[in-house]
Amino acid sequence: MRPISTFASLTAAAALAVLPLGAATGAPRAASPASSAPTATAATASAATASGVTVVHRHHGFRPGAGSVGDPYVGHLGNGGYDVRHYDLAVSYDPATDRLRGRAGISAVATQDLSRFNLDLVGLTVRSVTVDGRAARWNRAGGELRITPPRGLRTKRAFTTVVVYDGVPATLPDGSGFVHTGDGALVIGEPEVAATWFPVNDHPSDKATYHFDVTVPKGLTAVANGSLTRTRTHHGWTTWTWDARAPMASYLATATIGRFDLRRSTHAGIAIWDAVDPALHDPVARPRTGSSFAISGQADSSYKRLTRTIAVPAGGASVTFWVTRRTEQRWDHFFVEARHPGGDDWTTLPDANGHSSADTGDSCPQWLELHPFLTHYQHDDGDGTCTPSGTTGQWNAAAGKSSGPEQWRIDLTPYAGSTVELSLSYASDQSVQLPGVFIDDIAVSTGEGSTSFEPDGDVMDGWTVPGPPAGSPVNENDWSVGGVADVPPPPGVGADASLARESEVLDFLSATFGRYPFRASGGIVDDDPDLGFALENQTRPIYSQVFFDQPEGDTGVVVHELAHQWFGDSVSVRRWKDIWLNEGFATYAEWLWSEHDGQGSAQENFDFWFGAIASQSPFWQVVIGDPGRDLMFDDAVYLRGGMTLHQLRLTVGDEAFFTILRTWARTHRYGNGTTGQFIALAERVSHRQLDAFFDTWLRTPGKPVLPGAAPSATGRRAAALGLAAAPAGSRSLVIRFKQGLALR
């Protein structure tokens, strides 16, 4: 689908925020050359109700467009009978009420003699619909807006539909869609998201260009796709105007709203807009009181104890403290250890306030080899799971992030009339460390050992740092006392470091895949704690903050999402079953970048993942050429997809391989492609018959047999390898594997 240079405009979005829907808001822009029909003004759009509209079909043969595109992965999405050329979206959004008001102008061309057509729209209330400036009849059925124009639309007829609507946009059950945040909204999701905030033909087979007027309360920023062309403020509302002039699949459209530090730069003729939430530069933790607290430090393979002996009266005692946890969910744990001094009756004590649990997470059983002392509390069941009890005690711990300081209360009654050695402990695995644990305001009911770690001459008040137990590695760092200046850098530092390399990444990818397909680029990083993935929104990928918890950032995730600008955005799938064409290509781009950046060759990345994933793993049973709706974002689609490309490279040679990739990106630019088309191209360029090759890698379950390959890792060997052994360039994939995040 080619871009169209000019389109009919809707009325100014700013008016939506201050005028009732249906009020006259001024004259529209000139009509598009693609359509002779006038664009409806707001007054015209609301002049007739949905009922009582006369529909005249003067010719036989008109029929309704299909209610879906027939894609079994998303059977309810997409529609037939027309081809959208352009969306002109004017929306206002008020985070205080969560309400969105919108006016969508949709310029399309009929692909059949059309009596009725559908748009996808989830929730929201439709106020009026016009087709070519005349009120149309419409009704709702599930996620479908069914529109009957006043007259039938002949094949190849250009027409413009205007829908006025409002309501609270939906967040989808998987947490994507129109995601309401503390200061605005994230618009992000795949394969469906667009229909949660505007009427749309919601399938990548119907790409279009976009114009956005997004009006938000003054002080907030609205970031959409393409280039920022204008901002204007009126009566406390600011309208941000963005133009995306290259065809775009609907799921890639965004209008993300919030407080952002919006930065513009230019590189090689590409305008770059990066939006980073300033809250990401806030300290990861602060003392609850005073200016000091205990800081665990950030390091791999650590076992850190903050220890003190406490005399417990016959009537018992308790300890309370406040802890801020910024640890890796399900992998790194905070817990309270106890024993009689000098004894071997070790156990962990539960938090009486309910923050701890007996969940052993995902680090067990692997980390029992790293930290054998933990066998006091955990038992390897031999099937990849663990029992929360060990040789001497029980397991009680917490993993993940707390929402600020949380108070723990430890009951010392079991040690009544004796002395207990208590350790506030933090243990981590071999890879992906978050900032750690921070403790303040320890209060012992007897007074002994109570401290706020303030500089009063004895900041530790009897608490000591004994180091790791026997068998664990020496800690790279350990508990210390400090203030805000001493905590690990916040994720904003990592985000800035990663986005600072965008120009370098664009140069590398352009040299590898051919000319960058768009005029703009950039990225968005919000502080929303629940966002669990990154997505390749066209020209403006959105990243979860979790990728940037290391101060050096994660360039790999930036490579992945920018590679999608070629494979996924410019060249989109025609059917979702071919999703490996997006994710396998972006994954392999990470491996190519890894080699370019000195972080491990593509072969080393392949060897690690191919060897580390056990032959009996369900991973190898996913048929990535048609994985099914439930597995379309499975790890195998990414990794086996990347492996497929690497093996293709080895099969046809570098010259043919990179010619295939560049030709694919060039010949399908701004369009769609299928696996069959890619195979045909690979055979044509390489002069080889590749059916058997692609059958093995794309269509056959099971781990392929490679001549000369090392024996496959199995069982405990796969676990013992550990994700820490992955080449540095695969860090994004390590995070994804461990946290269940999605690099989309």
Image: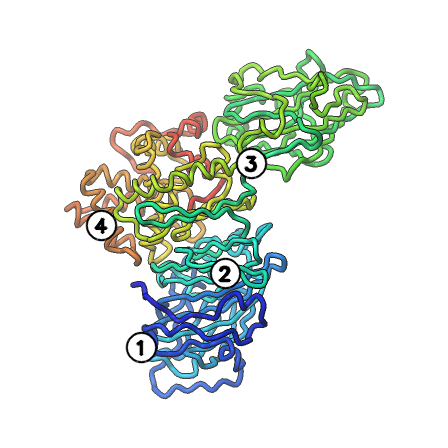
Distance, label 1 to label 4, CA atoms, is 33 Å
Residue under label 2 = 232
| Residue farthest toward the left in the current orientation of the protein | 687
Residue under label 4 = 663
Quick check: 353 above or below 460? below
- Which callout, 3 or 2, points to the residue nearer the camera? 2
Q: Earlier in the sequence, mark 1 or mark 4?
A: 1
Distance, label 1 to label 3, CA atoms, is 55 Å
Label 4 neighbour load within 10 Å: few <14, some 14-19, many 20+? some
Distance, label 2 to label 4, CA atoms, is 42 Å
Residue under label 3 = 329
Residue under label 1 = 155
Write the residue at 32% across / 54% down.
Answer: 570
Distance, label 2 to label 1, CA atoms, is 40 Å
Q: Earlier in the sequence, mark 1 or mark 3?
A: 1
Residue 216, visible in the rendered structure:
yes
Quick check: 9 above or below 572? below
Q: Earlier in the sequence, mark 2 or mark 1?
A: 1
Q: Amino acid at mark 2?
A: Arg
Q: Earlier in the sequence, mark 4 or mark 3?
A: 3
